Image (tube, grey):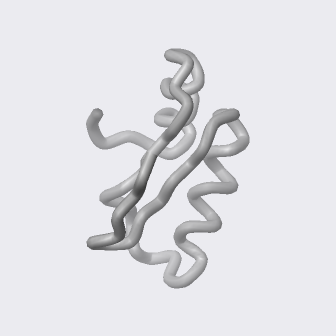
């Protein structure tokens, strides 16, 4: 929807009953741990599926 923190985006997604949360346009300063860090943080507030794609990665929902 817009720029947000992982926590805020995951809370909003949980509140509207979303089944999937896709986080993109993320900071790249976490290197190879980027996906895992974002997924772990999102799962603290969101019960559905969390996706953190790499550039050009295709996600099938």
Image-quadrant location for residue 38: bottom right
Q: Position of residue 2 (x, y in %)?
A: 27, 37
Which residue corresponds to the image point at 42% horizontal and 53% vertical from the top-left? 60
Which residue corresponds to the image point at 56% horizontal and 18% vertical from the top-left? 17
Q: How many marks?
A: 0
Which residue corresponds to the image point at 47% horizontal and 35% vertical from the top-left? 9
Q: Position of residue 4 (x, y in %)?
A: 38, 40
**Which part of the image, by quadrant, shows the C terminus?**
top left
Residue extending furthest toward the bottom? 32
Q: Is residue 51 above or below residue 31?
A: above
Q: Is residue 24 above or below residue 19?
A: below
Image-quadrant location for residue 48: top right
Q: Is residue 52 above or below residue 42?
A: below
Q: Position of residue 42 (x, y in %)?
A: 61, 45
Q: Is residue 29 above or below residue 46?
A: below
**Which part of the image, by quadrant, shows the N terminus?**
top left
Which residue corresponds to the image point at 62% horizontal and 64% vertical from the top-left? 37
């Amino acid at each position: 929807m817009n720029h947000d923190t992982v926590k805020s985006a995951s809370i909003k997604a949980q509140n509207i009953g979303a089944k999937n949360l896709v986080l993109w346009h993320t900071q790249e300063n976490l290197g190879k741990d980027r996906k895992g860090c974002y997924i772990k943080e999102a799962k603290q507030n969101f019960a559905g599926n969390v996706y953190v794609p790499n550039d050009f990665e295709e996600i099938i929902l």
